[in-house]
Image (cartoon, rainbow, N blue to C red):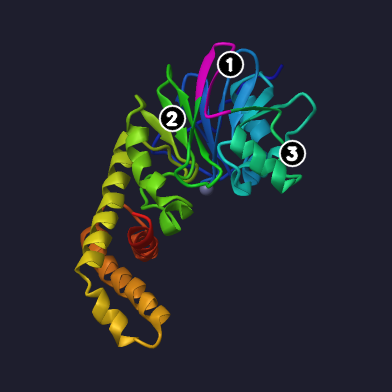
Amino acid sequence: MPALTRAHVQPDGVTDLRDGFLIREIGRGVFMLTNGNYQSVFLTTGEGVVLVDAPEPLVRHLPAAVAEVTDEPITTVVYSHGHSDHIGGTHLLADPTLEIIAEARIAEFIATKNDPRRPRPTRSFKDRMTLRKGSRTIEFVRDGFHSADGDLLVYLPEEKVLIGIDLIAPGWVPLLDFDITENMFNYISAFDRVLAYDFDVFISGHTADVAHRADVELTKRYTLDVYETVKRTHDELNIHELLDEDRDNEQAGIKKIIETVTGRATADVQSRWLDGPMKGVDLWTESHCRAMVLYVRWTD
Ligand SMILES: [Zn+2]
């Protein structure tokens, strides 16, 4: 058996991606693998490695990464949600003994898609489950902050690690349209559900870095600022005047409402956050305000 090298295990703050990937140890025997863009988590149990998500660009690094830190084989894959960019490499790991775990509605979505890159789960559960495997306790709770079929919160209570894929990106404001959420109400309220956990490390699926409580709190503050700014701007608007301007074309008036609130709210939010602690305000804030207008006007 070759000696374990741990050559790619790097501490917080060090990012050397010259081999295309790096590993961060986020708890004893719990590792985050990243190529700088995508992330997956793998952990030893004494009875085989459990992997959370298998993005295709990462799977080719997985055997080397796992072999650097443990002799255990990968026995279990957990799907955080159904999107192909996070689990589309699973087919490259699939052998008849691989256990694949997903929440019931995510499993149902995957069965409907019938995509060979996303093998069907071998085990599913409704809403919540505790997995006890070897030395580990892993808790799964269904949330719905971004995918219509559900997003799993994966919690390691002893290690104080929480995984919630596509909610926040440390150092950045959320991606386009608030992480392309399909449910803004659940997205906005997810921050408090996440912060209710006792965790030190938060894994959010992207970037080369792990996140911490402060990153979740900062993104919550930004998100609520966008919400309150859009709501205030919308409420101050003289909707009837705008609609009257296009009396013969009501839908043009609706378009004007969306564009006017988006423009004013974007300028307002950017005045506070453009030189702030998160990147991407120039890229994504306009999309955040537009997505929030749709929520505030028709759902809130
Ligand atoms: Zn993602």
In the displayed structure, 270 sits above or below 68; it is below
Residue extending furthest toward the right = 96
Query: First in sequence: mark 2 or mark 3?
Result: 3
Query: Residue 292 appears in which quarter of the rendering?
Result: bottom left
Instruction: List the residue tagged with mark 1.
Output: 45
Instruction: List the residue tagged with mark 3.
Output: 92
SS class, disc 1 = loop
Circles 1 and 2, Cβ within 8 Å, touching? The answer is no
| Front residue of 265 and 165 | 265
Residue flagged by tag 1: what amino acid is it? Thr
| Front residue of 63 and 112 | 112
Q: Nearer the viewer, mark 2 or mark 3?
A: 2
Give the percent coordinates (x, y) of residue 247: 34, 86
The CA span between labels 3 and 1 is 22 Å
Query: Residue 121 appears in which quarter of the rendering?
Result: top right
Instruction: List the residue tagged with mark 2.
Output: 162
Residue flagged by tag 3: what amino acid is it? Leu
Would residue 282 be seen by someone viewing this image from the given angle?
yes
Task: Categorize mark 1 by other alpha carbons within 10 Å: few (<14), some (14-19), many (20+).
Answer: some
